[in-house]
Image (cartoon, rainbow, N blue to C red):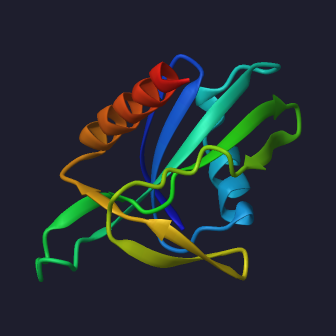
């Protein structure tokens, strides 16, 4: 897995990644971003996968929210501690894909965006709508 870009807003870190995603990858990514975090603070980290959109036979790069996995991060002296939570996975009315996560195949949804900023805005809007329904 490789990090492409990260954006932090408040206590949410949006991290664009490429390649295979696992909890080990997530911890490695979090440890590589110490300048974003203050010791003792708790953050939510959303990993956004980047890939080429194949549905339209295009080679154009798109950011894909393949699986938005919510993680709570506590910055510790020795590095980062990540706790995985499945409650924040986004499932929408989009085409399905099988995602390999920690040797387990799960069904996930894909939505393609032209940039990380557009993906972030969609996540925020989706979360806002979810909160209003409750």
Name the image quarter holding the C terminus. top right
Q: Position of residue 130 (x, y in %)?
A: 48, 30
User: 55 or 25: which is nearer to us?
Assistant: 55
99, above or below 71, in the image: below
Q: Position of residue 123 (x, y in %)?
A: 40, 37
User: 47 or 110: which is nearer to us?
Assistant: 110
The residue sitting at 60% across, 29% down in the picture is 35
The residue sitting at 67% across, 67% down in the picture is 22
Q: Residue furthest front?
A: 133
70, above or below 11, in the image: below
Q: Say whether residue 27 is left or right of residue 21.
A: right
Q: Position of residue 113 (x, y in %)?
A: 23, 52
User: 132 or 126: which is nearer to us?
Assistant: 132
Q: Position of residue 3 (x, y in %)?
A: 48, 55
The residue sitting at 59% across, 28% down in the picture is 36
User: 107 or 118: which is nearer to us?
Assistant: 107
Quadrant of res 62: bottom left
Q: Say whether residue 9 is left or right of residue 45.
A: left
Name the image quarter holding the N terminus. bottom right
């Amino acid at each position: 897995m490789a990090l492409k870009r990260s954006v932090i807003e408040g206590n949410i870190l949006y991290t664009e990644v490429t390649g295979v995603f696992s909890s080990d990858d997530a911890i490695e990514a979090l440890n590589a971003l110490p300048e974003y975090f203050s010791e003792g603070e708790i953050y939510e980290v959303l990993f956004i996968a980047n890939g080429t959109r194949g549905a339209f036979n295009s080679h154009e790069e798109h950011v894909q929210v393949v699986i938005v996995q919510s993680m709570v991060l506590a910055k510790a002296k020795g590095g980062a501690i990540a706790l995985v939570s499945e409650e924040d996975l986004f499932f929408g009315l989009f085409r399905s894909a099988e995602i390999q996560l920690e040797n387990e195949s799960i069904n996930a949804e894909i939505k393609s965006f032209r940039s990380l900023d557009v993906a972030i805005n969609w996540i925020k809007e989706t979360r806002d709508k979810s909160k209003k329904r409750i």
